[in-house]
Image (spheres, rainbow, N blue to C red):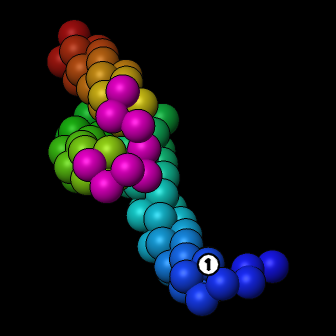
Amino acid sequence: MANTTSAKKATRKIARRTDVNKARRSRVRTFVRQVEEAIASGDADKAKAAFLAAQPELARAASKGVLHSNTASRKVSRLAARVKALSVSATA
C-alpha cells in the first residue's frame, strides 16, 4: 500500500490511465475484428472500408503508447495484405 502522498497520487493516476488504455485497446480490437469479419464474409468493399477505418485507430493506439509501433505496423500490413488478396480474388 502506498504510504506517501505522492505515491497515493501516483496510484490514482495509474488507475485513471489504465481505464483510458483499456478503452483504447478495446476500440482497436473492435476495429480489427470488423476488418476480419468482413474478410471472412468475402465482401471486398466492406473489408476495404473497415480496413480504412481501422488503420488510423491502430496508428493512434501506437502514438498513445497502447500498442508498440511495430505491432501496429505489423497488424496494418497483415490486414492490408489480406484485404488486397480478397479484392484480387474477387475481381479474378
Q: Which amino acid does the dot numbered 1 rest on? A: Ala
Residue in the picture at 30% in, 23% down:
77
19, 58: nearer the viewer:
19
Q: Dividing the picture into quarters, in which one does residue 91 lie?
A: top left
Q: Dividing the picture into quarters, in which one does residue 83 lie?
A: top left
Residue in the picture at 42% in, 64% down:
24
> In the picture provided, is 90 more to the left or to the right than 72?
left
Residue 79 visible at all: no
Residue in the picture at 61% in, 78% down:
7
Residue 81 visible at all: yes
Q: Residue furthest bottom?
A: 5
62, 92: nearer the viewer:
62
Give the labeled residue for mark 1. Answer: 7
SS category of the residue bearing label 1: helix
* Vertical relation: 26 (above or below) 29: below
83, 6: nearer the viewer:
6
Quadrant including the C terminus: top left
Q: Is residue 64 magenta?
A: yes
- What's drawn in magenta, residue-wise? 63-70
> In the picture provided, is 37 more to the left or to the right than 55?
right
Residue 25: x %, y % from top left: 48, 58
11, 26: nearer the viewer:
11
Q: Residue furthest right?
A: 1
Residue in the picture at 73% in, 80% down:
2
Quadrant including the N terminus: bottom right
> In the picture provided, is 33 more to the left or to the right than 65?
right
